[in-house]
Structures are given as C-alpha cells and as structure tokens.
C-alpha cells in the first residue's frame, strides 16, 4: 500500500536515532513535513539534514519531553514553522533496570516522567492544535513490557503499562474531536539501544522468546506508524499494536 501524507505535519520525539530516526525518514518519504525532536539537538539536526538531502522538509528541535514548557515550545515552534500539527509520535523513552527495592527514587521518577508524563504533556499541548485542523493522530511507543512485565524492569514496565491505558483514555475523551490515539508495542528491535547486547545473548533471547526467526528492524516499526497515521487507519483508535515476532502469542520457558 502506497501511503501519501503530503501536507501533513508530523512531530516525532526521540527522533534522533533508532525507531525515531527510521520513522522520521519514513514519514518524510510519504510526503509529510517532519519535526525531529530529540534531547540532543545535534542528533535531531543530523536526521533533519538527511530528510532535506532527500528533498523533504524537516525541522530539528532540542526538547526534554518531561518538561511542560519544553513540550509547549515544541508545539509552538512546529505551528510557527509549518502552520499546525497533524500527528504526534511519542517515541522518546528510557529503560532503567532494577526491581522496586533496587531502583532509586530519582531513577523511578525520571523513567515515569520521560516514558509516561511525556505522553500526557504531548497530548495536552498537541490536541488543541490538531482540533484546529479538524483532527489528528497521536501514536506512542510502549513496548511489550507494557503488556507483560519483565524481571528487573519495575519502573519501565509500570510506565509503559500506563502509556497503554492513557492512550485508551485519550482515545475515548477526544474521539468526537477527530483525534485518534494508538499504541505500538515493539519487541526486540535492532537499534542503537540494543547494539551493545552481545550476539550470543541476543540469539539466546530470541531463540527462547520469539517464534519468528530474525531481528525486527526499526523501519518495520516506522512503516506501522505511517500506516496508523494515515487515512487508511481512520477507524482505528484506542488500540495496541504488537510487532514482536510472535512473543506475546504464548508463554515460553
């Protein structure tokens, strides 16, 4: 299916690498004007330059997604540059390790703020601008740990489960305003975040927990995001989409 997003304005947080970068390039290839938001501005600028070199339009912004004023500025600068907001992809996130007795309060707060509060802030400030354009789409990355928890990932599992239910709440509250809101739950994806995992440890994990062979690519997540942002998905809202090679299909020991 060839998806045309010409004229649409897309904001992608955590757009400087991994799934965010792949999504920024995919949205731009579909004709969208892309705002690449990233904590490190230089990474956002590098992706925006890639888009521009391919003939697309992009704006790079340095944003800390857990701070309301930063998110408000992100939306305002997007509107100033491109005239509005059509799609927000909440992709930024961190994944600290530790059980509740091991993780510090500061690390817990940081994870909940970056992974969950950021979705609230993005929706809070993007929806009014989307409504002005007759509606819009909010997507969020949650990961499979938001569906089933993992040992040693207490904060991350809690935050991502919150993202899933917050998505449902947003979808219910704003459907009549033309807002659609969905979640993507990737499994083990080949990104810079997983690049440090030794090959033998990766292969053992995938062999034990993922029925389909191979490693999920970031561009495969990006293509799902493009579809969910398009009119082809106009009646899809409040849903969780799992792209994990079959991990969630059953229990593996």
Image (cartoon, rainbow, N blue to C red):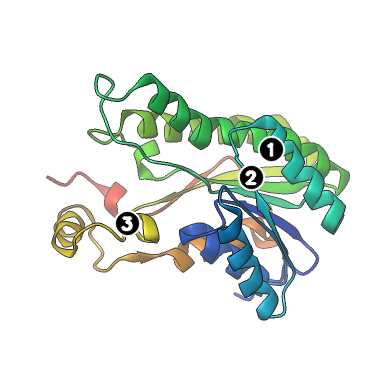
Residue 149's label in the rendered image is none
- Pointers 1 and 2 in contact (CB under 8 A)? yes
- Residue 199 is situated, as x and y percent measured from the top left of the image, at 18, 64
Looking at the picture, how far across and down is residue 95, in whole percent? Answer: 37, 40
* Quadrant location, the N terminus: bottom right
Residue 194 in the figure: left or right of residue 23: left
Mark 2–mark 3 distance (CA, rounded to whole Å): 23 Å
* Quadrant of the rendered image containing residue 245: bottom left
Which of the pair 124/183 is nearer the observer? 124
Q: Mark 2 = which residue? A: 63
Query: Which residue corresponds to the image point at 59% horizontal and 67% vertical from the top-left?
Result: 46
> Circle 1 — which element?
helix
Q: Kindly report the distance in space between the C-alpha atoms of the residues bearing marks 1 and 3.
A: 28 Å
Gap in angstroms between the C-alphas marked 1 and 2: 6 Å
Q: Earlier in the sequence, mark 1 or mark 2?
A: 2
**Residue drawn at (37%, 55%), measured in percent from left and top?**
193
Q: Is residue 100 left or right of residue 169?
A: left
Residue shown at 22%/59% (left/top)? 211
Residue that badge 1 annotates: 70
Labels 2 and 3: the sequence-earlier one: 2
The quadrant holding residue 225 is: bottom right
- Where residue 161 appears, as percent x and y from the top left, is 43, 32
How many other residues sit within 10 Å of disc 3, few (<14), some (14-19) or many (≥20)? few
Report the residue marked by disc 3: 194
The residue sitting at 69% across, 38% down in the picture is 71
So how many labels did they put on this image? 3
In this rendering, is residue 189 above or below 39? below
Q: Is 223 above or below relative to 101? A: below
CB-based contact (under 8 Å), mark 1 and mark 3: no
């Amino acid at each position: 299916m060839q998806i045309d997003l010409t004229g649409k304005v897309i904001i992608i947080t955590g757009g400087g690498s991994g799934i965010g970068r792949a999504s920024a390039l995919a949205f731009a290839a579909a004709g969208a004007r892309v705002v690449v938001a990233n904590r490190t501005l230089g990474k956002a600028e590098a992706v925006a330059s890639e888009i521009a070199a391919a003939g697309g339009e992009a704006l790079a912004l340095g944003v800390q997604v857990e701070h309301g004023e930063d998110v408000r500025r992100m939306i305002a600068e997007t509107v100033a540059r491109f005239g509005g907001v059509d799609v927000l992809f909440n992709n930024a996130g961190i994944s600290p390790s530790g059980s509740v007795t091991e993780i510090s309060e500061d690390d817990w707060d940081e994870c909940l703020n970056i992974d969950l509060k950021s979705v609230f802030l993005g929706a809070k400030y993007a929806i009014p601008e989307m409504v002005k354009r007759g509606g819009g789409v909010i997507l969020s990355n949650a990961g499979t740990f938001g569906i089933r928890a993992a040992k040693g990932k207490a904060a991350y599992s809690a935050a991502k489960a919150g993202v899933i239910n917050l998505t449902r709440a947003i979808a219910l509250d704003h459907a009549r305003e033309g807002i659609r809101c969905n979640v993507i739950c990737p499994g083990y994806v080949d990104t810079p975040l997983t690049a440090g995992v030794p090959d033998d440890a990766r292969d053992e994990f995938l062999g034990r927990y993922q029925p389909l062979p191979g490693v999920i690519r970031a561009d495969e997540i990006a293509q799902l995001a493009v579809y969910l942002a398009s009119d082809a998905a106009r009646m899809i809202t409040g849903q969780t989409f799992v792209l994990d090679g079959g991990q969630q299909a059953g229990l593996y020991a």
